[in-house]
Image (cartoon, rainbow, N blue to C red):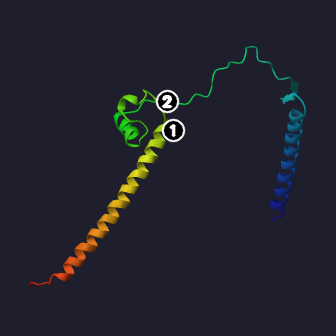
Amino acid sequence: MGSLRGLRLAAGSCFRLCERDASSSLTLTRNSDLKRINGFCTKPQESSRAPSHTYSHRVPLHKPTDWEKKILIWSGRFKKEDEIPETVTFEMLDAAKNKLRVKMSYVMIALTVAGCILMIIEGKKALSVPCILIL
């Protein structure tokens, strides 16, 4: 029991020591332009080339398959297959799929309600006809 307590105390003091070293190096980088690397202070290096004005974060494009083209048309994103560009973004494709999912769920809800009404009508018809049991 005593050795476990001693181990905890040693680990705690080691953690505090590492925390103090880390915080001192962080304050050094926050307060000045100097960075502490392996005990040496260095100035940040200037970039020798001019910054490019091109958009570096390009959106990944995807060439849609025939099925995905149909999804884009059914979702209402495009009117004809000729209007669909050669490549589309994944976000556009996901939005079209989600819109189609919502439309399909509306259709399923309508079919379920129609089926329930049909079963109620058929059940009332079955009540009015006398049942003959054949044994």
Q: Residue 69: x percent and y percent?
A: 38, 35
Residue depicted at 82% across the width and 60% down the height? 3
Which kind of residue does numbered mark 2 sit on? Answer: Leu
The residue at which mark 1 appears reads as 91
Residue 79, position as x, y percentages in the image: 38, 36
Residue in the image at 80% along x and 18% along y? 46
Marks 1 and 2 close (CB-CB < 8 Å): no
Residue pointed to by mark 2:
61
Q: Residues within 10 Å of mark 1 (few under 14, many from 20)?
A: few
- Give the position of the C terminus as an image quadrant: bottom left
SS under mark 2: strand
Label 2 neighbour load within 10 Å: few <14, some 14-19, many 20+: few
Q: CA distance from mark 1 to mark 2?
A: 9 Å
What's the mark number on residue 70?
A: none
User: Is 55 or 122 nearer to us in this picture?
Assistant: 122
Judged from this view, the residue extending furthest toward the left is 134
Secondary structure, mark 1, is helix
In the rendered structure, the answer to whether residue 110 lies left or right of residue 2 reads left
The percent position of residue 95, horizontal first and vertical second, equals: 48, 43
